[in-house]
Image (cartoon, coloured by chain):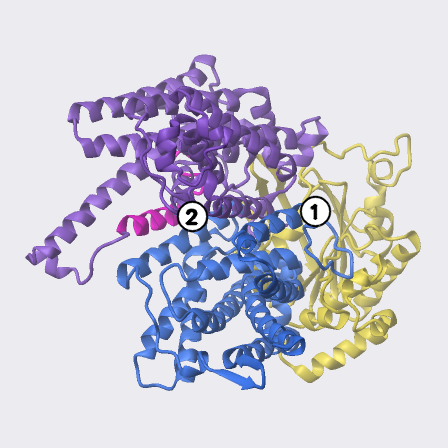
């Protein structure tokens, strides 16, 4: 294979994976920004959408409808999760909320284990997920191209939502100062529900492409995405949505790069190295790789 | 007509009693000052009115309607707007977005845009920096933004907590001039301030808080005649330190 | 707020009263051990031994979380280190050929063979040393950043253990470890750790650390260095976790890195939260309640599954094989506790002689503190 097609292939794979990672990180950060809650149960929203694909995929509906229904299922699960588990502990300290999310995560996994199956199940996926485009020596997976477009589309529409609507503005404002946002008359519950709905939507979109890649869904399917979201959002700075997107893309390029050019023996330690970097970033540059352009007052 | 009435308000932070039966009222069209040393309970009173702090006893009514127990967002929707201590603008949002969010409880789109233009004309510097992150503004500019943002909700009653805090002396004078201008525009103002001298210059009436109680209330002239005030708060007399500032009182 | 906290802990702090707590807790454990001996039931003996080891881990975690107020999800990193490092020293070279076939025979470690007690101590030393080193930078972090960092630490150690086959046999199960830990050994270990947790809590460092938990700036203003206290608590907690891992390894006799991951972390955290992280009694009571509750649920689960296979009336009522039911109940329990009683069952108080006095008729209950009036997050 010539170097140019190798480069194009690298770019396509990285952009596709990076977009996916960016969405994962966004879903985590949008909630963290407002509640200072690191939602471990975010991965289980991916799982819910995964089982949605499995369940709705049994029906004769076209895949696009199945996918939308699965995303809606994740949104509902996200909002319900907040209403049932997080709202009662919202005013507690960070540790209480963290442990609550850990418990919610375990609860949902166990329910899936009990009610569905511990074994991986394969949802009906359209053949588009495995087909490739061949252009000369260049071979590109169609799903990667769709992934790039879907990632960019999701990011653009989220940006428009956050900039143009009052609730979107309130979401961003609440990340700066939640109490003050309420003191402008914005209902706290509505803002938080919106954050969890967006989180669920991100998880749902992630699920389609994540499970599209592996072809399987199982009770712990959300673990890897949530771990990736952790890394990406710490890289970008837990409080910044822009940072989450950047962190996601950086991680995507890094992952594919390491996969392509590092020997297998070293690659086995990839996760260990990644999480080692997470600890280092937290220690050295807790605001993440990009700093805000203004100075934040310490309150 | 009485706009806001607070009666016998008691607030506790754990074992510490921050307010021990505060009563006050604000009539329409007034500037009412709430003065006192650090920890006297000024901010706690304001936070109670806003529903951020839950009192253990007392009543708060706005136009005869009880406010106590309502969440902040419901209280704001009744026509009360605060500017908080430390300004509390949203640094990562642009100036315009801050203003737009100030109008979060309104739905009249065109009128909102008209009001943004209006306050930008009133505060020209905000108009010039409309698209910049609010975190880039200077302290004085942020204070103007905080006031303009509060006004975007078309409030009947403006609660201002320490608007002069941390500003250069020249800007302080400007902020107080702004407050009288707002009153002339028909906004009623409850002004929480440590700057007693300036507050008494512009207020119609004032309440002097001391360790959680109203120590004295009346017109500025009456307060200035009150025995200790000169010595304790205006730096006159023998001691320049506020004698009655309690140790270990909660900072809210 | 710190003034309130001290006031709440103030009543009746006599020396006898304070010292009564570890005695009461250890007597409680001895009673459980005696019941187990009396029942002479192999399964129950196993349950109680694992319970004691988990209790040791929960109390070890309490030393850090209870005194510093920070959450750690990283304890199982040290359990992993403790488990593996203990077997490096307790196994004979011949046993290592079976258990750790990837370890080069030329290694110095390969030839090592020490008595169990020495192997335990070495494991504690390695775990403690690792904790001490990583703790130096780590204790500077606060809040959620700290917890994420400990979580990351768990994953790093887990992935290294999965890959470093020379030391761990990689993802495969290490087999054929001699059984040195029994009920009594676990009991002694748990008792020692309870005493250590108490000694730390009542020590000057522990006291200062708890003072700084509420307001680090205020504590710093009277000369308390919170980071130093956090580091000591963290290191102690790491060493104890390593001890727990070493004991468990020689009880269970076969394990892989998969045995030291999120589920296990969750179990220990749940024990601590349900009992109440603020007190050693809370950690101990939480461990007992969770362990016995889980065991009961597991038996119910088994019974249902047996009924199902037998196609009995009851069995046909349940449409699916019951599995992981105990975990569901545990997760719900922890959420309910956090919502209704956020400081756990013990509310951060210790069991003392006074506790029993108060249960007697005519006993006086100490009034509870005022609820926090602050409604919103006033960051």
Residue C334 magenta-highlighted: yes
Q: In the rendered image, which residue does mark 1 sit on?
A: A284
Q: Which chain is yellow?
A: B
Which SS type dominates the magenta stretch? helix
- B194 sits to left or right of A5: right
Q: Which chain is purple?
A: C
- A56 sits to left or right of C368: left
Magenta stretch bounds: C325-347
Figure quadrant of residue C98: top left
Q: Quadrant of the N terminus of chain A?
A: bottom right
Query: Crowding near pointer 2: few (<14 within 10 Å), some, many (20+)?
Result: some
Figure label count: 2
Q: Position of residue A142 (x, y in %)?
A: 51, 82
Figure quadrant of residue A33: bottom right
Q: Residue at x 71, y 26 (%)?
A: C223
Q: Residue at x 42, y 61 (%)?
A: A44
Question: Pointer 2 indicates a residue of which chain?
Answer: C
| Shade representing chain A | blue
A237 w.r.t. A79: above or below: above
The residues tagged by marks 1 and 2 sit, at their Cα atoms, a distance apart of 26 Å
Comparing B203 with C275, the one in front is C275
The answer, for residue A183, to whether it is visible in the render is no
Question: Pointer 1 indicates a residue of which chain?
Answer: A
- C301 sits to left or right of C314: right
Q: Secondary structure at mark 1?
A: helix
Q: Position of residue B111 (x, y in %)?
A: 71, 82
Q: In the rendered image, which residue does mark 2 sit on?
A: C262
Q: Position of residue B95 (x, y in %)?
A: 77, 69
Q: Secondary structure at mark 2?
A: helix
């Amino acid at each position: 294979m010539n170097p140019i097609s190798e480069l194009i292939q690298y770019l396509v794979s990285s952009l596709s994976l990076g977009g996916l990672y960016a969405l994962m990180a966004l879903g985590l950060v949008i909630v963290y920004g407002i509640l200072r809650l690191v939602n471990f149960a975010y991965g289980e929203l991916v799982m819910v959408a995964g089982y949605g694909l499995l369940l709705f995929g049994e029906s004769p509906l076209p895949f696009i409808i199945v996918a939308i229904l699965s995303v809606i299922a994740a949104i509902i699960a996200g909002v319900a999760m907040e209403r049932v588990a997080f709202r009662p502990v919202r005013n507690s300290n960070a540790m209480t909320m963290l442990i609550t999310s850990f418990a919610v995560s375990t609860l949902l996994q166990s329910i899936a284990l009990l009610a569905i199956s511990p074994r991986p199940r394969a949802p009906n996926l359209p053949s588009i997920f495995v087909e490739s485009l061949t252009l000369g020596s260049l071979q590109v997976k169609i799903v990667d191209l769709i992934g790039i477009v879907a990632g960019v589309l999701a990011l653009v529409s989220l940006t428009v939502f956050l900039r143009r609507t009052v609730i979107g503005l309130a979401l961003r404002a609440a990340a700066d100062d939640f109490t003050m946002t309420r003191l402008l008359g914005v209902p706290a519950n509505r803002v938080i529900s919106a954050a969890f709905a967006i989180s669920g939507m991100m998880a749902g979109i992630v699920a389609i492409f994540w499970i599209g890649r592996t072809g399987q869904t199982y009770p712990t399917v959300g673990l890897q995405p949530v771990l990736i979201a952790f890394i990406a959002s710490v890289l970008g700075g837990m409080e910044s949505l822009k940072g989450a997107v950047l962190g996601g893309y950086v991680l995507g390029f890094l992952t594919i790069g390491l996969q392509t050019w590092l020997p297998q023996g070293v690659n086995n330690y990839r996760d260990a190295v990644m999480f080692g970097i997470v600890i280092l970033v937290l220690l050295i540059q807790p605001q993440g790789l990009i700093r805000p352009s203004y100075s934040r007052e310490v309150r | 007509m009485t706009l806001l009435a607070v009666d016998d308000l008691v607030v506790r932070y754990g074992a510490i009693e921050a307010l021990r039966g505060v009563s006050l009222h604000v009539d329409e069209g007034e500037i009412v000052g709430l003065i006192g040393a650090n920890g006297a309970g000024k901010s706690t009173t304001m936070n109670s009115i806003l529903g951020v702090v839950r009192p253990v006893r007392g009543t708060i009514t706005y136009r005869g309607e009880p406010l106590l127990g309502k969440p902040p967002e419901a209280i704001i929707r009744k026509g009360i707007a605060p500017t908080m201590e430390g300004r509390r603008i949203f640094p990562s949002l642009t100036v315009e977005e801050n203003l737009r969010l100030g109008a979060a409880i309104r739905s009249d789109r065109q009128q909102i845009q008209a009001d943004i233009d209006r306050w930008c004309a009133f505060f020209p510097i905000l108009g010039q920096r409309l698209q910049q992150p609010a975190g880039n503004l200077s302290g004085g500019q942020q204070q103007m933004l905080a006031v303009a943002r509060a006004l975007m909700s078309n409030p009947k009653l403006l609660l201002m907590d320490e608007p002069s805090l941390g500003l250069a002396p020249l800007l302080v004078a400007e902020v107080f001039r702004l407050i009288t201008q707002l009153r002339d525009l028909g906004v009623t103002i409850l002004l929480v301030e440590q700057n007693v001298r300036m507050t008494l210059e512009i207020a119609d009436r004032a309440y002097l808080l001391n360790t959680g109680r109203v120590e004295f209330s009346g017109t500025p002239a009456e307060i200035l005649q009150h025995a200790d005030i000169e010595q304790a708060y205006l730096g006159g007399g023998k001691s320049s330190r506020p004698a009655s500032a309690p140790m270990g009182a909660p900072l809210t | 707020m710190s003034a309130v906290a001290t006031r709440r802990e103030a009543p009746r702090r006599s020396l006898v009263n304070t010292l009564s707590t570890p005695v009461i807790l250890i007597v409680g454990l001895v009673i459980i051990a005696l019941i187990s001996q009396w029942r002479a039931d192999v399964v129950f003996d196993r349950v109680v031994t694992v319970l004691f080891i988990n209790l040791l881990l929960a109390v070890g975690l309490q030393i850090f979380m209870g005194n510093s107020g920070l959450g750690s999800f990283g304890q199982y990193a040290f359990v992993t280190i403790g488990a593996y490092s203990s077997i490096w020293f307790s196994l004979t070279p011949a046993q290592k050929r079976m258990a750790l076939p990837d370890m080069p025979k030329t290694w110095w470690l390969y030839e090592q063979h020490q008595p169990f007690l020495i192997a335990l101590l070495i494991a504690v030393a390695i775990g403690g040393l690792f904790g001490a080193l990583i703790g130096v930078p780590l204790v500077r972090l606060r809040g959620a950043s700290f917890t994420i960092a400990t979580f990351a630490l768990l994953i790093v150690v887990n992935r290294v253990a999965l890959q470093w086959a020379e030391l761990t046999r990689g993802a495969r199960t290490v087999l054929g470890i001699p059984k040195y830990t029994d009920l009594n050994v676990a009991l002694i270990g748990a008792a020692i750790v309870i005493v250590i947790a108490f000694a730390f809590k009542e020590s000057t460092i522990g006291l200062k650390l708890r003072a700084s938990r509420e307001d680090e700036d205020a504590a710093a203003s009277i000369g308390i260095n919170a980071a130093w206290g956090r580091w000591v608590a963290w290191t102690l907690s790491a060493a104890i976790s390593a001890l727990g891992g070493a004991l468990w390894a020689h009880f269970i006799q076969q394990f892989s890195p998969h045995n030291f991951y999120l589920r296990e972390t969750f179990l220990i955290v749940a024990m601590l939260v349900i009992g109440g992280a603020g007190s050693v009694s809370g950690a101990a009571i939480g461990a007992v309640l969770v362990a016995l509750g889980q065991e009961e649920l597991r038996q119910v689960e088994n019974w249902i599954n047996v009924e199902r296979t037998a196609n009995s009336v009851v069995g046909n009522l349940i449409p699916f094989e019951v599995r992981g039911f105990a975990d569901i109940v545990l997760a719900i329990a922890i959420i309910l506790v956090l919502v209704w009683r956020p400081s756990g069952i013990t509310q951060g108080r210790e069991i003392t002689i006074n506790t029993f006095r108060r249960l007697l008729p005519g006993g006086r209950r100490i009034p509870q503190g005022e609820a926090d009036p602050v409604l919103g997050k006033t960051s």
